Image: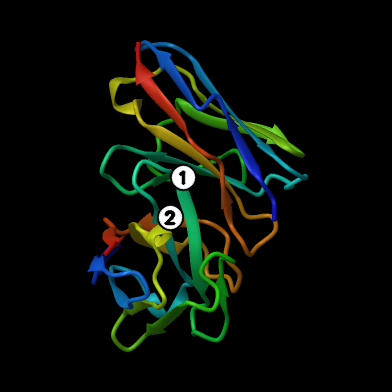
Amino acid sequence: DIQMTQSPSSLSASVGDRVTITCRASQGISNSLAWYQQKPGKAPKLLLYAASRLESGVPSRFSGSGSGTDYTLTISSLQPEDFATYYCQQYYTTPPLTFGGGTKVEIK
Amino acid sequence: QVQLVESGGGVVQPGGSLRLSCSASGFTFSSYGMHWVRQAPGKGLEWVAFIQYDGSNKYYADSVKGRFTISRDNSKNTLYLQMNSLRAEDTAVYYCAKERTPVTTPYYFDYWGQGTLVTVSS
């Protein structure tokens, strides 16, 4: 199974900050990566797929990049509604689909 | 608009059984694979199972293989998860989720239900 490691596990940031979250796969996943946002008590929401493709309706301040084993999610200017937990998920080798452990973005 | 509504969660004793349902609307249910994903309290996401659009192929996480069965009734636009031999570590919110593209293998999820809580405890 492919293991996904996210870092950091949590971070504190201010509104307007640029935030970067990293996801590392245990083997190359050829951009087969999705990113989700989850707010407390809510279901996850798809943000990006194929590492860098923005899901319809998602603000353009969210972007993704990477290749091989290393991928990043960037929020260019953090907004109040962006405080949440973010998960990466690989779909290169399935089953199983595997998620990273999550990154909680908190208000500084 | 796409809606997924889970039901059937509750408290069950270790070794017991439970069947979850997910009622789908707002898309052509019979054209898309469907998933169950769970989240233990305060923990991350864990993929549980996938069923192909027509029910002909099913995949499971090792942690539930042999105990859980995913199924669907396309005439009722409903997804199911039969959970047997439940353990304390199966305690979680269970989400049904729609596969993003009409493919026959599991990829990723574009719509999720609100989740239903399953608690396994004596």
The residue tagged 2 is B110
| 10 Å crowding of disc 2: few (<14), some (14-19), many (20+) | some
Instruction: Specify the amino acid type for callout 1.
Output: Glu
Camera-nearest residue between B8 and B111: B8
Q: Quadrant of the N terminus of chain A?
A: bottom right
**Quadrant location of residue B30?**
bottom left
Q: Does residue B112 sit above or below A38 in this rendering?
A: below
Instruction: Specify the amino acid type for callout 2.
Output: Asp
Give coordinates of residue A100: x percent, y percent.
56, 41
Q: Does residue A73 sit above or below B100 in this rendering?
A: above
Q: Chain of mark 2?
A: B
Give coordinates of residue B83: x percent, y percent.
39, 75
Asked if residue A28 shows in the view, the reply is yes
**Residue located farthest toward the bottom when viewing the structure as drawn:** B75
The residue tagged 1 is A55
Relative horizontal placement of residue A47, taking residue A41 as reference (left or right): right
- Residue contact between numbered discs 1 and 2, judged by CB atoms under 8 Å: yes
Q: Secondary structure at mark 1?
A: loop
Question: How is the structure coloured here?
Answer: rainbow
Asked if residue B1 shows in the view, the reply is no
What residue lies at 36% left-to-right and 20% top-to-bottom?
A: A106
What residue lies at 57% left-to-right and 60% top-to-bottom?
A: B107
Q: Does residue A67 sit above or below A46 in this rendering?
A: above
Give coordinates of residue B49: x percent, y percent.
50, 69
Camera-nearest residue between B45 and B78: B45
